[in-house]
Image (cartoon, rainbow, N blue to C red):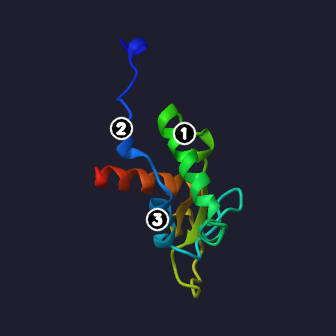
Amino acid sequence: MRADYVGSPHLEVFDFDTELLDDILSCMQRGKAADYQGLSTEHLLYSHYVLSCVIATFFNVIIHVGYVPSQFGISYTVPLLKCNAGCTKKLSVLDFRGISISPVLSKVLSIAYCAALVHF
């Protein structure tokens, strides 16, 4: 049965446009850590306006083809110390929490897809 599965039909309602991406980028938090390629939200936000058109086209191709690039799943974990700067005890693994740094474009795609579903 899986060999014949083709997925749900693509609806034009789910197409991403430049306005949606501009809204998403303007609402994203600034000043966060860059992803593993050095790309941050500020790069997308303050870039040339044509980039929103290119990203919208790229996301539409991803949805039409049904394949998300494997690089969208790559992230790295940064350990952060839980206690204050005045922590004087001997540190253990339990004194740290990890934050995961994901690619900025994968965050934008997930927010855009959720926004398209809400509008539908």
Indicate the amino acid at tag 3: Ile
Distance from the alpha carbon under mark 2 to that under mark 3: 21 Å
| Location of residue 81 in the rendering, given as x and y in whole percent from the top left corner | 56, 73
| Location of residue 55 in the rendering, given as x and y in whole percent from the top left corner | 58, 53
Indicate the amino acid at tag 2: Leu
The residue at 59%/67% (across/down) is: 41
The residue at 47%/62% (across/down) is: 19
| Residue 102 shows up from this direction | no
Q: Looking at the figure, which quarter contains the N terminus?
A: top left
Q: Residues within 10 Å of mark 3 (few under 14, many from 20)?
A: some
Indicate the amino acid at tag 1: Val
Numbered disc 2: secondary structure: loop
Q: Decide which of tag 2 and tag 3 comes sooner along the chain.
A: 2
Q: Nearer the viewer, mark 2 or mark 3?
A: 2
Q: Which residue is mark 2?
A: 11
8 sits to left or right of 82: left
User: Residues at badges 2 and 1 in contact (C-beta under 8 Å)?
Assistant: no
The residue at 38%/45% (across/down) is: 14
35 sits to left or right of 4: right
Give the number of the disc on residue 24: 3
| Residue 115 shows up from this direction | yes
Residue sitting nearer the eye, 101 or 114: 114
Q: Which residue is mark 1?
A: 61
